[in-house]
Amino acid sequence: MAAQFPRMRLRRLRSHDRLRTMMAEVSLERRHLILPLFAVPGSGIESPIASLEGVSHFSVDRLLPFVERALEKGIGAFLLFGLPERKDARGDSASDPQGPVQQALRELSERFPEALLVTDVCLCQYTDHGHCGLIDGDVIDNDGTLKQLAAVALSHAEAGAHMVAPSDMMDGRVGAIRTALDAGGFASISIMSYAAKMASSFYGPFRDAADSAPGFGDRRTYQMAATNGREALREALADEEEGADILMVKPALTCLDILARLREKTLLPLATYLVSGERMMLRSAAAAGLLDLRRATLEAHLACRRAGADLIITYDALDLADWLD
């Protein structure tokens, strides 16, 4: 029978700074972090995003020195989103070799070969209706979208991406992208799938940043209901079967239970995305004097690690790099 108080005193292992550090079950390090970036057409552009404090739109020429500073801080992985010059019903500009993501990939891969370049694969930023797939009337055409997504992923691989991250939540997209990459000579390009992505209210600032709010309806027919944990596991394990190399759970803080349950079901690496609304919730509370921003941000990211995340996509990567010192 286990010893009880007073012989068992759990506070003994918290009694010294060094001992507390030695007893830490998880750590948060720069190698765990992926920094999102927003690439836009043009030149000389570094435009702050009003709803996403500390985050900017960058033209490719301004993106290069920003990435260089991030690398100097020890942040070496980046998730690229793009805003196009033109939109249409099919999102054809998403696979344009001269699009901002493709241009950024070519420049960054040549200038910074040590950087890991990951790309978001979706159509919502590129369609004039704002949905993540092609539409047939007022219905999202799942199977018709797969070829378009595969073309986007292939264009990113050709431009220099090391990893693609489909975020659309169409059924079968991981398999379609894997087939296209392999057939195109890019079998070494990995896939990090947005495997369990909720139809969350915490994406608001991102949709401003990416100009990707749906023009009609919502995304609940393809993104997941926050009520369904078992379905989230089915989604993730289906992506594993289709060839995903890393599984992502999104949002982070409201889905820690799913992340922990998925950790028990798969041997694949897991990622999570501390999304724009979660980040701004912490920052708004800190601005109101309700919490300490540094401690709260570190605690939120450590919670993701404790729940099972190997990687965390976070807008706070640069601040965390400073705070971790």
Image (cartoon, helix red, strand yellow):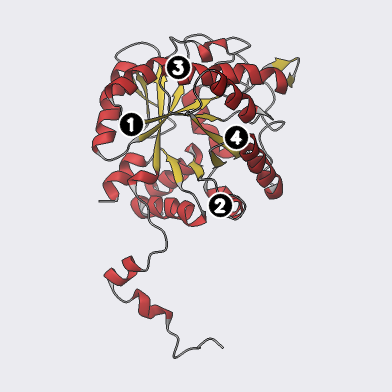
Q: CA distance from mark 3 to mark 2?
A: 35 Å
Mark 4 falls on what kind of element? loop
Q: CA distance from mark 1 to mark 3?
A: 17 Å
Q: Front-most of 148 and 291? A: 148
Q: Estimate the spatial distance between the alpha carbons at disc 1 and disc 4, rounded to whole Å.
A: 24 Å
User: Which is closer to the viewer, label 3 or label 2?
Assistant: 3
Q: Residue at x 43, y 9 (%)?
A: 98
Find the distance from the CA under tag 2 to the CA under tag 4: 24 Å
Name the spot of residue 110 as percent of width and height, x first.
30, 20
Three-letter residue code for mark 4? Gly
Residue 152, picture quadrant: top right
Q: Circle 1 sits on which residue? A: 115
Mark closest to the chain's N terminus, 1 or 3:
1
Q: Secondary structure at mark 2?
A: helix
Mark 1 burial class by Cα count in 10 Å: few <14, some 14-19, many 20+: some
- Whether tag 3 and tag 2 are in contact, CB under 8 A, the answer is no
Disc 3 target residue: 158
Q: Position of residue 229 (x, y in %)?
A: 68, 49
Mark 4 sits on what residue? 243
Label 1 sits on what residue type? Ala
Badge 3, how many Cα within 10 Å: few under 14, some, many 20+?
some
Q: Is residue 107 above or below residue 3?
A: above
Amino acid found under the numbered disc labelled 2: Leu
Residue at 64% across, 34% down: 242
Q: Which residue is disc 2 drawn over?
A: 256
Circle nearer the N terminus (3, 4): 3
**Number of numbered discs visible in the structure rendering:** 4
Tell me if residue 263 can be seen.
Answer: yes
